[in-house]
Image (cartoon, rainbow, N blue to C red):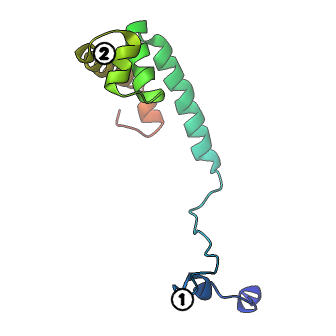
Amino acid sequence: MRLRKRREVSLELLKSPDNEDEYTPIELAEWREIPVEALAQKELAARLEEALAALPEIYREVLILRDIDELNIAETSAALEISVAAVKTRLLRARLMVRDYFVSRSWATHLGFGKA
C-alpha cells in the first residue's frame, strides 16, 4: 500500500484522454497459467487427438481442413476435389462422430463439458 501511495505517476493520469502523447498501458486479464486448467486443456487435447485418429480418413481430412487449418468450404472442396455438399455432409458427420466418441468414453463429463 505504501508503494502505491508513493507512485510518481498515477494510473488515472495515464488513462486520461488529455494525454494523447503519453503511453497508455493495456490492462490485461489474469495471464498466469492455472495448473488445474492447464492439466484439463492438455488432457482434452490428448483426447481430441485420439478422437481424430479414430475417425475414418474421409471425415478426418474434412474436419482437420475446416476446423484446424481453418479453410473455408470452397477451399476444402477444392483441396479434396469433392463437392461443396460433400464437404458439408462429411464435416457434420465428423463433428458428430467426435462428439459421440467423447460421450461414449465419458471424458466430456470428466472434463466438465456435460452431464453423465
Mark 2 or mark 1: whose residue is earlier in sequence: 1
Tell me the residue at 58%/64% (across/down). 28
Q: Which mark is residue 90?
A: 2
Amino acid marked by disc 1: Asp
Quarter holding the N terminus?
Answer: bottom right
Q: Where residue 59 sits: x, y (%)?
A: 37, 13
Q: Nearer the viewer, residue 64 or 16?
A: 16
Quadrant (top left/top right/bottom left/bottom right) for the C terminus: top left
Looking at the image, which is closer to me, 44 or 17? 17
Q: Secondary structure at mark 2?
A: helix
Circle 2 crowding by C-alpha within 10 Å: few under 14, some 14–19, many from 20: some
Q: Position of residue 41 (x, y in %)?
A: 56, 38
Query: How far across and down, in percent of the image, does residue 5 sit?
Result: 71, 92
Q: Nearer the viewer, residue 1 or 77?
A: 77
Q: Is residue 82 above or below residue 97?
A: above
Q: CA distance from mark 2 to mark 1?
A: 56 Å
Q: 109 above or below 84?
A: below
Q: What residue sits 40% from the left and 21% below the top?
A: 63
Residue 104 appears anywhere in the view: no
- The residue carrying mark 1 is 18
Amino acid type of the residue that numbered disc 2 sits on in the rendered structure: Arg
For the question of whether residue 65 can be seen, the reply is: yes
Name the residue at 53% across, 21% down. Answer: 49
